[in-house]
Image (cartoon, grey):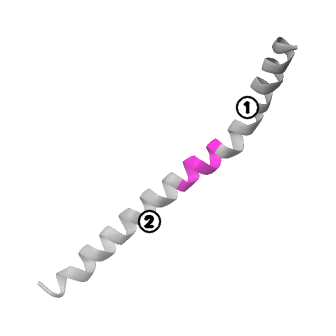
Amino acid sequence: MPQAMPMNWLILFFLFTLIFMLINMKLYFNNKMMPQMKLIKFKKFNNWKW
């Protein structure tokens, strides 16, 4: 059993790293894409308000 533990821990480590990388990719793309939409919405709201 002690010989099988490192493989399990490596698999868990790779799974957590992959999940963390996917979350970081999603957050990065959302932060990269959203500011333009927020600026467009903010400008439209200002045009409508004024």
Exactly how many numbered labels are in the figure?
2
Give the labeled residue for mark 2: 17
The residue that disc 1 covers is 38
The residue shown at (78%, 26%) is 42
Locate residue 39: give its quadrant: top right
Q: Which numbered disc covers residue 15? A: none
Query: Between 5 and 30, which is closer to the camera in this rendering?
Result: 30
Pointer 2 or 1: first along the chain: 2
| First to last magenta residue range | 24-30
Q: Is the stretch drawn in magenta largely helix, strand or loop?
A: helix
Residue 5, compared with residue 12, is above or below; it is: below
Quarter containing the N terminus:
bottom left
Q: Is residue 25 magenta?
A: yes
**In the displayed structure, would residue 14 be above or below residue 6?**
above
Q: Position of residue 14 (x, y in %)?
A: 39, 68
- Foreground pick, 35 / 18: 35
| Residue plotted at (55% across, 55% down) | 24
Which residue in the rendered view is the most extreme toward the left?
Answer: 1
